[in-house]
Image (spheres, grey):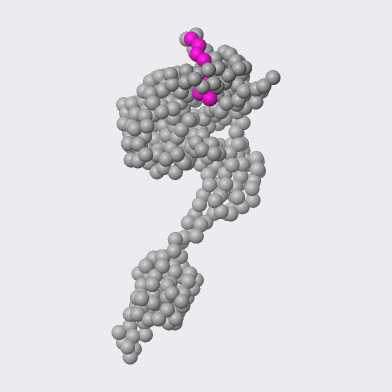
Amino acid sequence: MAKAYTPGLKVSARTTHRTRRLLPIPGEVKVAVGDVVEANDVVAETFMDGDITPMNMANRLSCSAGDVAGLMLKQIGDPVKEGEPIARSKGIFGAFKTEVAADADGTLEQVSSVTGQVMIRGAAIPVQVRAYLSGKVVDVLPKEGCIIENDVMFVQGIFGIGGETEGVIQVACGGHEETLDADAITADMKDAVVLGGARMTVAALRKAIEVGAAAVVSGGLDDQDLKELLGRDLGVAITGSETIGITVIVTEGFGDIAMAARTWRLLAERAGRVASVNGATQIRAGVMRPEILVPLEAGENEDEVDPTLAREAGLLELGTTVRVIRDPYFGLLGEVSALPAEPAVLGSGSRARVLEVRFPGGDTAVVPRANVELIEG
């Protein structure tokens, strides 16, 4: 019998999660296999070359490029300070000498006899990789990084902005259908992961930035609010590098959409617990979804072990929970109640494979299989 598959988001009460923590260039790994780390621990470190400050020394000394090396007061490899004389002209009859001071702190790296340029290399820039997820180091990649593993509650969002952060979950809304307004954001949410309900307003996000919240997670977001928050239209490449001072994750989609009841319950039940959050999103090839990870205690949620382990990922079958992602049922959750084998004729006159969805109220609808996404876990 043929099987049907569809992409989907994962919402799991308990699953074993591994995260790779890698340096951009070779460096030093500071942990060993078996070490237990916290989210903020530095697990690897390296140093990138500092910025180059060029100085046109031939021009400043009014000499030829070939004469620059003989007029330098500092040698290649010497440290220099901004404002410190590093070259001096011969002058006229030993007088009227011109001194040139360094334009920046650093190390004298190059003196060119061809161009007359002098290069000052700034101090090395430290690059640290933090654990991001509390857990145990299960593998070390020499000079590259490590892999950290832990049992977590795992929620994937549909869209996010901002990079990795972590904080204690604080519930700002009374339920999954409640709009997150600015009044719900309070001063004690500094460094917290704020849990909303349905749509989050731009005023709420600005208030969250003002109080210093680490992240905001809610069901929906208006695209105009997002544009207003960022000050520009967002492209379709990779998000996660935004520097607005907060990470934002949308779990359902754009518009006034309530967070799925189960997703809200799983997060709300862990209020007061530390969550690791990453808003990075890529919607093209190599899909990357924003995520919320909450490390679990031993034995916690063992009766809710990830059901996707017992079936193939992305498999559509009767009883599978799906979200409709096209009008007129956009944003609604339901269960697959039928999977007709033959294509059906749609309202547009085209033919497509369809499925039947039963919504919580008991109503059913026939929709194209391409118009749903799987809610895994």
Find residue 59 and report its horizontal and vertical position in percent: 36, 76
Q: Is residue 58 above or below residue 213?
A: below
Which residue is most to the front? Answer: 349
As displayed, is residue 291 above or below residue 108?
above
Question: Measuring 55% from the left and 39% from the top, which residue is drawn there?
Answer: 286
Q: Is residue 376 left or right of residue 167?
A: right
Residue 4: x %, y % from top left? 62, 23
- Give me the residue at 61% from left, 52% from top: 143
Residue nearer the viewer, 310 or 90: 310
Up-down relation of residue 16 to residue 238 (above or below): above
Q: Nearer the viewer, residue 135 or 341?
A: 341
Question: Which image quadrant is residue 53 in?
Answer: bottom left
Does residue 143 show up? yes
Going 45% across and 35% down the picture, which residue do you hit?
160
Residue sitting at the far bottom: 93
Q: Number of labelled discs?
A: 0
Chain part drawn in magenta: 363-371
Asked if the stretch drawn in magenta spans residue 317, the answer is: no
Q: Quadrant of residue 186?
A: top left
Question: As drawn, which residue projects farthest toward the top?
Answer: 362
Taking 365 as reference, is 224 left or right?
A: left
Horizontal side, residue 189 vs residue 38: left or right:
left
Q: Which quarter of the rendering shows the C terminus?
A: top right
- Please say whether residue 165 is visible from this viewpoint: no
- Quadrant position of the N terminus in the picture: top right
Residue 11 drawn at (x, y percent): 54, 26
Question: Where's residue 85, x and y in %?
Answer: 37, 74
What residue is rendered at 46% in x and 70% in y?
Answer: 108
